[in-house]
Structures are given as C-alpha cells and as structure tokens.
C-alpha cells in the first residue's frame, strides 16, 4: 500500500501523537546486551551503531547519552517519496526554537524533540495540521 505524497493532504492528516516516555540516542560498537524489542531505531554509521532507546533501557545498560527526547509520531502514512513534509515540520519547530531529529520509517515519520519541548512541539504540529500550509 503506497503512502500519501500530496503535501497538503499530508499536513492536514498528519495527526501528531506523543508517545509515552523519554528516549535517548546512544552509540554502541555492537548490539550485544541489547534486546531488539527495546530498540526504537537503529542506524549504522562509520563511527558505530546509533540506537534510539527508551531512557530507562539506556540507564539500565549504563549507556551514555547527552539528549533526552520526547517521541512524536505523525500518524499519516507518508510515502518515502513525499516531498516537503520533513521541511514543513522542521520549519515550524525551528521558528519556535524547538530542535528536532526526524526519522522516516516505512509508514510514518517520527520526530524526536527535547523532552522539555514535547507539549510545545505537539501543539505546534497540531496547528500546522489545522492550517495545512507548508509556508
């Protein structure tokens, strides 16, 4: 089932949803000691493996991290070929001084913002959805 590509429809139907808990980005040399079910995201970089984990999991495994994030999911099924969604979301958050880290998965886009900005970001994304305007 292909995802949505029309930017206006994506924005109007994105339905941002705040996931419970706090999340952190860690870098590890291997996945030893990690349970795959605990891993929210994984990306291989030249310097090592980046894993996105619940903060409690990272604490239990004594993994260092420097950024505690809230996780927002855009519930619209966006196409990986869609143009402009990430830019529109990042622009609105940046204008309000909210940093964001975006992860595009097969069905949805996931936005990680500082945990202290969770509700501010959620409200900003809801306002963006209400207008449906990328600019």
Image (cartoon, rainbow, N blue to C red):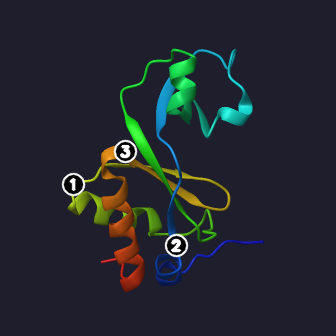
Is 61 positioned to the left or the right of 119 in the image?
right
Q: How many marks?
A: 3
- Residue displayed at 47% across by 40% down: 22
Which disc is residue 97 wearing? Answer: 1
- Residue displayed at 44% across by 62% down: 86
| Cα distance between the residues tagged 2 and 3 | 19 Å
Q: Residue furthest right?
A: 1
**Contact check, label 3 and label 1, Cβ < 8 Å:** no
User: Which quadrant, please, contains the C terminus?
Assistant: bottom left
Q: Earlier in the sequence, mark 2 or mark 3?
A: 2
Residue 83: where, in percent of width, then height? 49, 69
Estimate how packed mark 2 is, as few (under 14), some (14 to 19) or many (20 or more) residues with alpha carbons within 10 Å.
some
Quick one: SS at disc 3? Answer: helix
Q: Where does label 3 land, which residue? A: 115
Quick one: SS at disc 1? Answer: loop
Is 109 above or below relative to 59? below
Instruction: Examine the image and state in which quarter residue 75 appears.
Output: bottom right
- Residue displayed at 48% across by 82% down: 12
Residue 5: where, in percent of width, then height? 58, 76
Between residue 76 and residue 63, name the one nearer to us.
63
Between residue 113 and residue 105, name the one nearer to us.
113
Q: Earlier in the sequence, mark 1 or mark 2?
A: 2
- Residue displayed at 50% across by 31% down: 55
């Amino acid at each position: 089932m292909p995802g949505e590509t029309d930017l206006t429809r994506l924005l109007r139907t994105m339905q941002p949803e705040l996931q419970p808990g706090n999340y952190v980005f860690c870098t590890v040399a291997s996945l030893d000691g990690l349970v795959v079910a605990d891993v929210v995201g994984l990306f291989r970089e030249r310097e090592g493996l980046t894993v996105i984990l619940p903060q409690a999991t990272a604490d239990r495994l004594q993994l260092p991290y420097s950024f505690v994030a809230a996780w927002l999911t855009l519930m619209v099924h966006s196409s990986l070929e869609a143009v402009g969604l990430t830019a529109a979301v990042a622009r609105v958050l940046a204008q309000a001084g909210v940093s964001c880290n975006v992860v595009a998965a097969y069905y949805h886009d996931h936005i990680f913002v500082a945990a202290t900005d969770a509700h501010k970001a959620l409200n900003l994304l809801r306002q963006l959805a209400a207008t449906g305007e990328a600019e």
